[in-house]
């Protein structure tokens, strides 16, 4: 039975349980809900929760465990020597799975009878032709061990699914009965519902945290794997980045890190003053009407996809800069793609991040502070410089560091605007590249995932992660330090 | 301003410091102050009393043009300090506010050190020639606000770390550091406990030796304790203005009588 229908049936049981439980509790109280401990709906919900929660939990665990169990069983049954040179167990298993799915589809479309699909003495060539006729992609000839494995794979999965369906339905019905037995007036159904809400919220929080941990762990393991085949001293010590897929790559991080930092610094030099001044204008000087129009207009910038900014860099800003600094002008710039191009465009992208957050923070400074300053005969700009901005500083620093994190992690603008050459140079009109852009180029294309040239992407990602984490910690530290002083 | 004591502060024999004639204030379409005429005496405490929303704070804010910072507010009429029209086009409201200091309802020290709070005004207006000069100004203001002894050892500590009463006295010190001639106080004790209130009231009584003090208050006892002149506002009208003693013992207007005896409010 497909999982979808199983879910639907369990939900239907829960709805039925809800109605029954509610009615039973009411009946127990003689039809007067004032004699119940909880509102009637809580008794219904109690039954529904007891029907759904254990059943779905079992289903989730089963759905995760079954493929792992079946695969290991099937893999164990495969004869030795099935794994050819230059291949791996996972490739063979992929073929087994593909074959099994092919058989499933063929049976479903009627190209093969269920008996033949599970027959142990089926003719291999006939099998292959039928699968190919059914439009299934299989290797030219399926070997006997693979076919046997695929058949046992199918059989085990079928039993597994059947077992799961039965157990889940049994658990749902059992839970309903359990909940119904509790539907008497003294039962504290409201507290049970409260506890379930709490459990649901904890589960949501845990999923977010566990995912983060999972991502970090996968980064760490792959980074360790990379450093096992490529020395860390070269990665952090070499000043050259020249990956070559024939081997002998020079994978020094410094040119990439330098490009990342250089572009980010230019972007922040553009975004911070403009964003901050825009925020000050909007929150302190602008009239209500101007603000109502200008704030959303600036925030539109934040909604533009970065690839569009990339196009803007490549097609507009680059040629524009070439006109001034290129060979026709000052002669400092060799091509339109350069650190300056990407930095300027990224700066524009970051303006709304700085301005929108700073604007909120400046608005949060109490009016009493401004009144106090005006009352002493300070002008608007004196008040802003000496009272409002110092009071808002922790938040503004937070906004700037958030923008910095965005700048360091930005990819598309760099790919299109900054070029692809990894080089260490001080000239902002040279083409450079960043860590993120190189992660993209190392993982796209037909690279072997076990080679240092591909695995370096994880080391690069790890480095970026540590830098942004450091920035965030630093931001927290700044915010805390000033908060202590001000409150 | 001068530290010399000025014992001659009996009501009735001083010059008039502030005169208001036919003052009207509008918030958008609301007519908040109607035809207020009042003469405020120099070196005395004048109390504005009246029920909430009667316009007493609004009128107070007209005297240092704080209402200019509110977009929808419009002031008409004639307010003069020492005979000069403060709503004249040539008057810079920023300059005016240095001359007419203000203390607010809630203590609002800046998120700076105690020293920097007091030095804020003098720095902005360039009142000190050098650091030593500024030190003297800060100390004098803190002494005159009767808070010097409590904070002299921690001038670099944040002003926000003081207690409510200390904060309010710090705000008063901050206001008098710019050497104003008039001190406006908008319910300066409403956020304070009785002990801090007593300290601030004592301070206000001290301050009238050197300044013209105008105080808005909800507490009639406070008005009776600290002021020499009292003005009663009701629904935007100045109902009655006279010596404090006369307002509280022998009011001429029925509305004043009902308010001071607690029957409307």
Image (cartoon, rainbow, N blue to C red):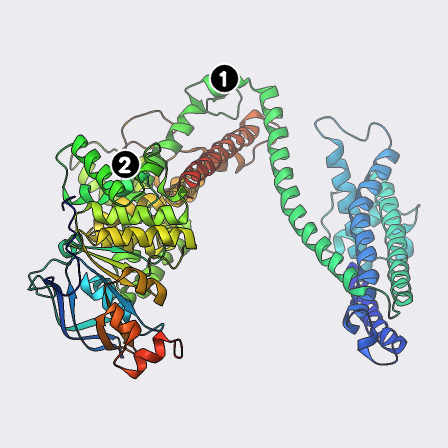
C-alpha span from label 1 to label 2: 31 Å
Dot 1, how many residues are within 10 Å of its Cα: few (below 14), some (14-19), or many (20+)? some
**Residue B162 position in % (x across, y down):** 39, 43
Along the horizontal axis of the image, is A401 left or right of B101? right
Along the horizontal axis of the image, is B220 left or right of B38? right
Q: Which chain carries label 1?
A: A
Q: Residue A234 carries which label?
A: 1
**Residue A241 position in % (x across, y down):** 44, 24
User: Mark 1 or 2, which is nearer the eye?
Assistant: 1
Q: Nearer the viewer, residue A402 or A390?
A: A390
Q: Which chain carries label 2?
A: A
Dot 2, how many residues are within 10 Å of its Cα: few (below 14), some (14-19), or many (20+)? some
| Upstream in sequence: badge 1 or badge 2 | 1
Residue B48 in which image quadrant: bottom left
Along the horizontal axis of the image, is A194 left or right of B22? right
Residue for badge 2: A335
Does A473 sit above or below residue A119? above
Residue at 31% x, 52% y is: B202
Q: Nearer the viewer, residue A406 or A422?
A: A406
Asked whether the viewer can see residue A113, the reply is no
Residue at 82% x, 27% y is: A81
Residue B36 in which image quadrant: bottom left
Residue at 11% x, 57% y is: B92
Q: Which SS class for mark 2?
A: loop
**Residue B220 position in % (x across, y down):** 35, 67
Query: Mark 1–mark 2 contact, CB under 8 Å?
Result: no
Q: Quadrant of the C terminus of chain A?
A: top left
Asked whether the viewer can see residue A37, the reply is yes
Residue A200 in which image quadrant: bottom right
Q: Which residue lies furthest to the bottom in this view?
A: B254
**Residue A87 position in % (x across, y down):** 72, 30
């Amino acid at each position: 039975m497909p999982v979808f229908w199983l879910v639907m049936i369990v939900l239907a049981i829960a709805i039925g349980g809800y109605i029954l439980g509610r009615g039973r509790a009411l009946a127990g109280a003689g039809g007067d809900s004032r004699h119940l401990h909880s509102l009637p709906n809580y008794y219904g919900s109690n039954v529904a929760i007891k029907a759904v929660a254990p059943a779905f939990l079992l289903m989730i665990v089963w759905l995760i465990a079954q493929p792992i169990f079946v695969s290991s069983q099937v893999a164990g049954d495969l004869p030795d020597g099935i794994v050819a040179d230059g291949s791996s167990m996972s490739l063979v298993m992929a073929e087994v799975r593909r074959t099994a799915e092919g058989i499933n589809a063929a049976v479903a479309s009627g190209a093969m009878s269920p008996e033949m699909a599970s027959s142990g003495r089926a003719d291999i060539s006939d099998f292959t032709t039928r699968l190919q006729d059914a439009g299934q992609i299989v290797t030219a000839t399926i070997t006997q061990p693979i076919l046997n494995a695929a058949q046992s794979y199918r059989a085990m999965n079928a039993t597994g699914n059947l077992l799961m369906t039965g157990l889940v339905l049994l658990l749902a019905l059992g839970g309903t009965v359990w909940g119904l037995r509790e539907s008497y007036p003294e039962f504290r159904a409201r507290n049970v519902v409260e506890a379930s809400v709490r459990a649901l919220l904890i589960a949501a929080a845990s999923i977010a945290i566990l995912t983060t941990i999972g991502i970090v762990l996968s980064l760490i393991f792959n980074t360790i794997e990379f450093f096992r085949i490529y020395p860390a001293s070269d990665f952090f010590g070499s000043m050259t980045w020249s990956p070559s897929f024939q081997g002998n790559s020079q994978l020094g991080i410094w040119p990439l890190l330098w490009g990342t930092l250089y572009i980010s610094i230019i972007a922040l030099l553009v975004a911070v003053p403009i964003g901050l001044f825009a925020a000050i204008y909007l929150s302190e000087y602008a009239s209500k009407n101007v603000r109502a129009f200008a704030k959303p207009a600036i925030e539109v910038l934040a909604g533009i996809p970065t690839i569009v900014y990339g196009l803007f860099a490549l097609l507009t800003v680059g040629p524009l800069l070439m006109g001034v600094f290129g060979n026709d002008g000052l002669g400092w710039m060799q091509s339109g793609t350069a650190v300056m191009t990407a930095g300027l465009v990224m700066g524009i992208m970051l303006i709304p991040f700085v301005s929108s957050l700073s604007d909120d923070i400046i608005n949060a400074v109490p009016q009493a502070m401004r009144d106090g300053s005006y009352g002493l005969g300070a002008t608007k700009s004196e008040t802003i410089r000496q009272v409002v901005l110092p009071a808002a500083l922790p938040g503004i620093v937070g906004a700037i560091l958030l923008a910095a994190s965005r700048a360091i992690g930005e990819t598309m603008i760099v790919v299109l605007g900054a070029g692809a050459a990894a080089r260490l140079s001080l000239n902002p009109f040279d083409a450079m590249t960043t860590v993120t852009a190189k992660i993209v180029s190392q993982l796209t294309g037909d690279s072997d995932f076990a080679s240092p040239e591909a695995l370096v992407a994880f080391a690069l990602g790890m480095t970026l992660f540590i830098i942004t984490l450091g920035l965030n910690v630093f931001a927290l530290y700044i915010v805390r330090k000033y908060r202590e002083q001000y409150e | 301003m001068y530290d010399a004591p000025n014992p001659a502060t009996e009501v009735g024999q001083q010059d008039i410091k502030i005169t208001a004639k036919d003052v009207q204030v509008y918030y958008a379409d609301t007519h908040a102050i109607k035809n207020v005429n009042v003469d405020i005496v120099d070196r005395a405490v004048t109390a504005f009393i009246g029920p909430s929303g009667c316009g007493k704070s609004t009128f107070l804010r007209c005297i240092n043009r704080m209402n200019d910072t509110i977009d929808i507010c419009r002031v008409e009429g004639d307010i003069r300090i020492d005979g000069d029209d403060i709503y004249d086009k040539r008057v810079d409201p920023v300059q005016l506010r240095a001359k007419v200091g203000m203390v607010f309802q809630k203590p609002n020290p800046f998120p700076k050190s105690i020293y920097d709070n007091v030095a804020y005004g003098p720095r902005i207006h360039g009142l000190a020639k050098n650091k030593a000069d500024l030190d003297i100004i800060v100390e004098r203001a803190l002494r005159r606000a009767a808070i010097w002894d409590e904070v002299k050892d921690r001038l670099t500590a944040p002003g926000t770390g003081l207690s409510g009463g200390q904060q309010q006295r710090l705000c008063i010190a901050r206001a008098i550091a710019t050497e104003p001639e008039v001190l406006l106080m908008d319910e300066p004790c409403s956020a304070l406990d009785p002990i801090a209130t007593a300290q601030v009231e004592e301070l206000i009584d001290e301050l009238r030796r050197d300044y013209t003090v105008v105080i808005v208050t909800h507490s009639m006892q406070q008005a009776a304790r600290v002021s020499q002149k009292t003005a009663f506002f009701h629904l935007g009208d100045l109902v009655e203005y006279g010596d404090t003693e006369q307002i509280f013992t022998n009011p001429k207007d029925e509305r004043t009588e009902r308010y001071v005896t607690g029957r409307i409010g």
